[in-house]
Image (cartoon, rainbow, N blue to C red):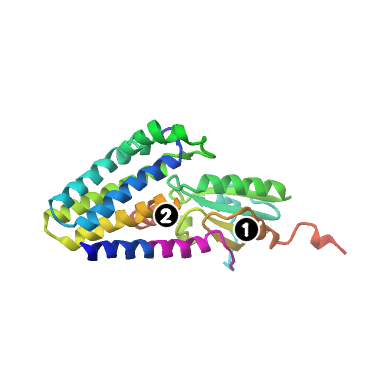
Amino acid sequence: MLVRALIVLAVLGLAALGWWWWSRREGQVRHVEIPGALTPDVLGAPRGYRATYVQFSTPMCAKCPGTRALLQRVAAEYEGVTHVDIDASERLDLARELDIMRTPTTLVLDTNGVVVARINGAPTEAQAREAIDATPSPGTEYAI
Amino acid sequence: MATDIQIDPRGPRFGAAWTLLLAVLAMVIGTNSVGLVLAFALAALFLPGAIVGPQATVQSAVFKKWVRPRLAPPAETESFRPPRFAQQVGLFFATLAIVFLALNLAVGFYIAIGFILVASFLNAVFDFCLGCEVYLLVTRATRRA
């Protein structure tokens, strides 16, 4: 009985460690290069002319509604940034193709629809902004 | 999809603390008649949550009657679907534990209870829903289209 109690403590300790490691990665903005663009056709929604948040959610995802509200709010503050929410359990084709393993996962598309960043898990507001700030703002190409 | 029900997210968390307590007891007491009773108790607690939703569990009744009146209103509510799915996963493992015990497979019993132990611990202590995280993986693995 003592051995099993110690095993329980060890398992819970490992679970806590695993959670700490997992939550440290949560929301981190990773810059990626995926060749090929996601067209409005594939997304089922128009893209922003500066950048697009493509959020993958499922109905069973506890943090997805919060992330949706956050990204919609941040997107509204930038010019030319939009937010698209995709149900990954309905679009398994996209989820497989883009290797979506968990929800929420958010891809950030640049002006051409190319995936430039990936956020696994729920981002903070700062992380959501960081991903957009890394994309060129519209107008810079016209500056002299 | 049927209409959504919004619940206080602290309810399932409170419920997970009770699940955690029973899972710890089942692990420590082990594969005997008391362990079997505990596994049945876990399954019985998961059952209403798995079928109707977390708002129907015994723990949620306790939460509504004695805990929630003492708390401030929730900062936000959540859909009942993620915790209901988690309860279904829990029911699956509790049933598995009973089957393993009936087959006299002690290791299987401990592994099945171990999953409930870890999941309820993460939910109660860190507000992290393990069952919800695996939903997409399960869907990806089991559905073709």
Residue drawn at x 69%, y 63% is A134
Snapshot quadrant of residue A1: bottom left
Q: Residues within 10 Å of mark 1 (few under 14, many from 20)?
A: some
Residue drawn at x 23%, y 53% is B26
* Residue B64, numbered label: none
Principal SS element in the magenta part? Answer: helix
Q: Position of residue B136 (x, y in %)?
A: 41, 54
Q: Position of residue A68 (x, y in %)?
A: 57, 46
Q: Amino acid at mark 1?
A: Gln
Residue matched to label 1: A127
Does residue B79 lie above or below A18 as drawn?
A: above
- Using the rendered image of the protein, determine whether residue B63 is visible from the camera's viewpoint: yes
Residues in magenta, as a range: A15-32
Residue A79 or residue B7, whichever sits in front: B7
Report the Cα–Cα distance between label 1 and label 2.
21 Å
Residue matched to label 2: B133
- Using the rendered image of the protein, determine whether residue B139 is visible from the camera's viewpoint: no
Q: Residues within 10 Å of mark 2 (few under 14, many from 20)?
A: many
Q: Is residue A12 magenta?
A: no
- Residue A99 is left or right of residue B88, and the answer is right
